[in-house]
C-alpha cells in the first residue's frame, strides 16, 4: 500500500521548485546552444529543423493521450503499488506504440511530405531523407515525456538534472559539431537531435528503474480501474495539452506554410530563435507547474483548503523571479540576437512579444495544473478552446501586416487569456486567491526595479554594448534579490531554506 497522505507545506514547494529548476536548466542550455547551430547550418536550415521538431512535438502531444498529465494524478492517488505500476505500464504501452506506427508511416511517405515544406534550395535535395530519419524522433520523444512524467509523479524532481542538462543537450551539441566537421549540412542538425533523443530515452529507462520496480510493472495485471482513471484524466487535459503545444509549435509551421520558398524556412527560423530565448523565463513557469501538479493532487487528499498557501507562495515566488528576467531579456534582446548571426535581428519584435507573454503567463500563476489535478476536468478544456480562439482570431487580423510579430502577439494574447480564465476558476471552485496583498507588493517592487533597469539601459547605451550589458546584468541580479527580500513574507523566505540564508534573505 502507498503511504498515508500527509499535509504539505511551503518547504515542499521550495524544495521541489529548486530541484525542478535545476532539471529545467536544460532548456537554458538549449537556448544558449542555438546560436552555434545557426552559425553552423544557417537560419534557413535551422528553420527547417524548427518546423520538423514542431511537428514531432505536436503529434507526440496527441498520441500520448494526455498521460504525461494523467500520471501526475493517478500515481500519487493510487491505493497500492501494483495499481501505480499498472498505470505506468498502460501509459507506456498505449502512449508509445501509436507513435511507432506513425513514425513508420511518415518514413514511408517522406517524399510526398517533403513537397509540403518550404525550404532553401540547398536543403531541398536532402529533405525527404531528413523527414524519413527524423520521423523516429516521435516514439523516442513520446517515451521520454511519459517516463519523466512518471518520475515527477513520484515527486522525484531532481533526477532529470543530469538527463536534461548533460546528456540531452551536451550530446546533441557534440553530435552537431562532429557531423558538421564531417561535411553534413542539411542532415547534420537533424541527425544530432535524433541521436541525443536515443541516448536520453535509454537513460530515462534507467531512471524509471530507480523509482519503479520494472519487473512489477511488467507483471502488473490489466487494471480496468487504472485504465479508466488514466483515460479519463488524460482525455480531460488532452485538448488543453494540445492547445498549449499548438501555441508553442503551431506558429513556425504556419509561417513556413504561408511564406513560399526559402522565405518560409527563414520566417520559421526567426520565430524559432525568438521562441528559444523566450523559453528562458518559461523555465520559471514550468518549474512551478511541475511542482504544483503532484503537490496539489496529494494535498487534495488531505485538505483541499490547505492548497491555498502552497498556491499563493508559488505564485509570489515565480512573480519576483520572472519579472526582472523578462525586463533584462528585452533590454538585451538586440545583443542576444547578434549571437545568432546575420539576419537574426529580424526576430527582435517577435522576441519582445513572446517574452512579455511568458512573463504575464507566469505572473498569473499555476492555476492550470491545480485545476487539472484536483478534479475539475472540464475547465482546462474550456480554457484551451477560448485561448485557441483568441489566438486564431488575432492571427487572421495581425499576421497579414505584421507577419511573425503579429503571430507572436496573437500567441501571447492566447496564453494570457487562458491563464486568466484559470485563476478565475480556481477562485470560484476552490476559493484559491492569486492576487493577495503580498502579491501586489511583489508586483510593485518588480515594476520599480524594472523601471530602474530600463533607465540605466538608456543612460549607458552611448557607452557601448559591453557596458550596457554589464550594467543591465548587474541590476538584474540586484532587482531579483530586492524582489525576494521585500516581495516575499518572512515565512516565504524561511521556506527557501539554505538558499535563503545564503542569499541573506533571512536574519
Image (cartoon, rainbow, N blue to C red):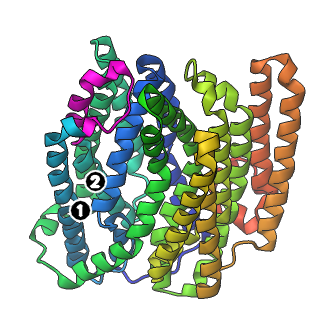
Residue 121 picture quarter: top left
Circle on res. 142: 2
Q: Position of residue 425 (x, y in %)?
A: 60, 80
Could one spot residue 314 in this view of the protein? no
Q: Position of residue 196 (x, y in %)?
A: 30, 35
Disc 1 from disc 2: Cα separation: 7 Å
Which type of secondary structure does the marked residue at label 2 adopt?
helix
| Location of mark 1 (residue) | 95
Query: In the drawing, does residue 468 fall left or right of residue 106?
Result: right
The one nearer the camera, 97 or 450, is 97
Q: Mark 1 near mark 2, Cβ–Cβ under 8 Å?
A: yes
Residue 194 picture quarter: top left
Q: Residues within 10 Å of mark 1 (few under 14, many from 20)?
A: many
* Residue depicted at x 55% and y 54%: 18
Depicted 383 relative to depicted 146: above or below: below
* Residue depicted at x 45% and y 50%: 250
Q: Name the dominant secondary structure of the magenta segment.
A: helix
* Residue depicted at x 76% and y 26%: 470
Q: Earlier in the sequence, mark 1 or mark 2?
A: 1
- Residue bounds of the magenta highlight: 113-135
How many numbered circles are shown? 2
The one nearer the camera, 20 or 247, is 247
Instruction: Verify whether residue 134 appears in magenta.
Output: yes
Amino acid at each position: 500500500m502507498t503511504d498515508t497522505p500527509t499535509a504539505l507545506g511551503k518547504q515542499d514547494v521550495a524544495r521541489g521548485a529548486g530541484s525542478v529548476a535545476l532539471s529545467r536548466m536544460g532548456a537554458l542550455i538549449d537556448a544558449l546552444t542555438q546560436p552555434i547551430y545557426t552559425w553552423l547550418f544557417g537560419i534557413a536550415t535551422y528553420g527547417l529543423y524548427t518546423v520538423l521538431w514542431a511537428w514531432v512535438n505536436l503529434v507526440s502531444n496527441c498520441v500520448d493521450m494526455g498521460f504525461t498529465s494523467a500520471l501526475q494524478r493517478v500515481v500519487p492517488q493510487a491505493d497500492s503499488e501494483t495499481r501505480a505500476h499498472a498505470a505506468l505500464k498502460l501509459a507506456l504501452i498505449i502512449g508509445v506504440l501509436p507513435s511507432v506506427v506513425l513514425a513508420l508511416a511518415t518514413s514511408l511517405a517522406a517524399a510526398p511530405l517533403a513537397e509540403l515544406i518550404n525550404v532553401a534550395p540547398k536543403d531541398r535535395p536532402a529533405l525527404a531523407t531528413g523527414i524519413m530519419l527524423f520521423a523516429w524522433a516521435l516514439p523516442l520523444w513520446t517515451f521520454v515525456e511519459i517516463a519523466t512524467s512518471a518520475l515527477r509523479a513520484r515527486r522525484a524532481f531532481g533526477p532529470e538534472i543530469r538527463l536534461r542538462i548533460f546528456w540531452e543537450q551536451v550530446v546533441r551539441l557534440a553530435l552537431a559539431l562532429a557531423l558538421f566537421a564531417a561535411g553534413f549540412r542539411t542532415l547534420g542538425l537533424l541527425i544530432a537531435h535524433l541521436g541525443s533523443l536515443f541516448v536520453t530515452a535509454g537513460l530515462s529507462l534507467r531512471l524509471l528503474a530507480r523509482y519503479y520496480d520494472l519487473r512489477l510493472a511488467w507483471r502488473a495485471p490489466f487494471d480496468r480501474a487504472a485504465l479508466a482513471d488514466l483515460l479519463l484524466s488524460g482525455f480531460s487535459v488532452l485538448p488543453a495539452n494540445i492547445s498549449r503545444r499548438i501555441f508553442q509549435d503551431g506558429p513556425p509551421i504556419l509561417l513556413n506554410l504561408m511564406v513560399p520558398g526559402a522565405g518560409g524556412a527563414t520566417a520559421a527560423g526567426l520565430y524559432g530563435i525568438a521562441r528559444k530565448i523566450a523559453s528562458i523565463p518559461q523555465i520559471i513557469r514550468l518549474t512551478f507547474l511541475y511542482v504544483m501538479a503532484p503537490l496539489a493532487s496529494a494535498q487534495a487528499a488531505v485538505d483541499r483548503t490547505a492548497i491555498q498557501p502552497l498556491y499563493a507562495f508559488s505564485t509570489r515566488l515565480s512573480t519576483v523571479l520572472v519579472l526582472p528576467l523578462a525586463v533584462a531579456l528585452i533590454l538585451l534582446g538586440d545583443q542576444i540576437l547578434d549571437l545568432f548571426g546575420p539576419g537574426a535581428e529580424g526576430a527582435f519584435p517577435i522576441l519582445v512579444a513572446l517574452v512579455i507573454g511568458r512573463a504575464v503567463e507566469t505572473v498569473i500563476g499555476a492555476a492550470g495544473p491545480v485545476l487539472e489535478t484536483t478534479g475539475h476536468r472540464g475547465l482546462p478544456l474550456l480554457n484551451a478552446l477560448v485561448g485557441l480562439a483568441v489566438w486564431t482570431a488575432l492571427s487572421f487580423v495581425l499576421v497579414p501586416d505584421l507577419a511573425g510579430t503579429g503571430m507572436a502577439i496573437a500567441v501571447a494574447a492566447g496564453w494570457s487569456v487562458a491563464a486568466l480564465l484559470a485563476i478565475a476558476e480556481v477562485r470560484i471552485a476552490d476559493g484559491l486567491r492569486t492576487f493577495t496583498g503580498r502579491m501586489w507588493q511583489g508586483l510593485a517592487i518588480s515594476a520599480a526595479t524594472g523601471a530602474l533597469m530600463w533607465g540605466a539601459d538608456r543612460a549607458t547605451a552611448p557607452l557601448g554594448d559591453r557596458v550596457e550589458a554589464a550594467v543591465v546584468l548587474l541590476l538584474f541580479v540586484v532587482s531579483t534579490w530586492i524582489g525576494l527580500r521585500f516581495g516575499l513574507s518572512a515565512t516565504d523566505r524561511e521556506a527557501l531554506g539554505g538558499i535563503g540564508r545564503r542569499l541573506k534573505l533571512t536574519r
